[in-house]
Image (spheres, rainbow, N blue to C red):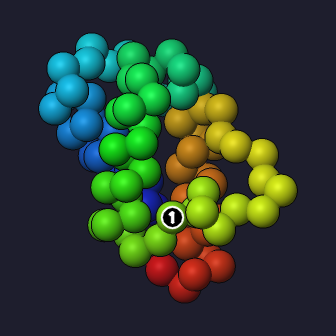
Amino acid sequence: MLARVEIIAVIKEVGAEQGKNLAPLSDELGLLETGLDSLCFAIIVARLEDRLGFDPFGAAEDTRFPVTIGDFIKFYEAAAKHVGA
């Protein structure tokens, strides 16, 4: 649950910093429909690595990449279990 709160906070922070008009965030919202671009997602992943201490994308082997906000959060939550975060 902690990852969810942190992820949503970082998404909102980066969106505001980059001047993006975010769609209302929900688990079902597609990442491509958030209003964020690839630079924003790169910043989000880097910032989450700083805050959470791991990058699930760097460690991912043969993994389906997240499509929705909910998938993105679950991806981080699953990775946190493997790194003991």
Q: How many marks?
A: 1
Residue beneath the point at 36% across and 33% down: 40
For residue 17, side relative to residue 72 (left or right): left
Q: Of residues 20 and 12, which is closer to you in this image? A: 20
For the residue marked with disc 1, what is the amino acid? Asp
Percent position of residue 85, x then y: 48, 80
Q: Of residues 1 and 45, which is closer to you in this image? A: 45
| Image quadrant where residue 12 sits | top left
Q: In the rendered image, is residue 2 in sight?
A: no
For residue 28, side relative to residue 18 (left or right): right
For residue 40, side relative to residue 1 (left or right): left
Residue beneath the point at 83% across and 56% down: 62
Q: Residue furthest bottom?
A: 84
Quarter placement of the N terminus: bottom left
Q: Residues within 10 Å of mark 1 (few under 14, many from 20)?
A: some
Q: Is residue 55 above or below residue 30?
A: below
Judging by the rendered image, the residue that carries numbered circle 1 is 55
Percent position of residue 6, x then y: 33, 56
Element marked by disc 1? loop
Q: Residue furthest right?
A: 62
Residue beneath the point at 38% across and 32% down: 39
Residue beneath the point at 32% across and 19% down: 22
Q: Is residue 82 above or below residue 40?
A: below
Percent position of residue 35, x then y: 39, 17
Q: In the rendered image, is residue 23 in sight?
A: yes
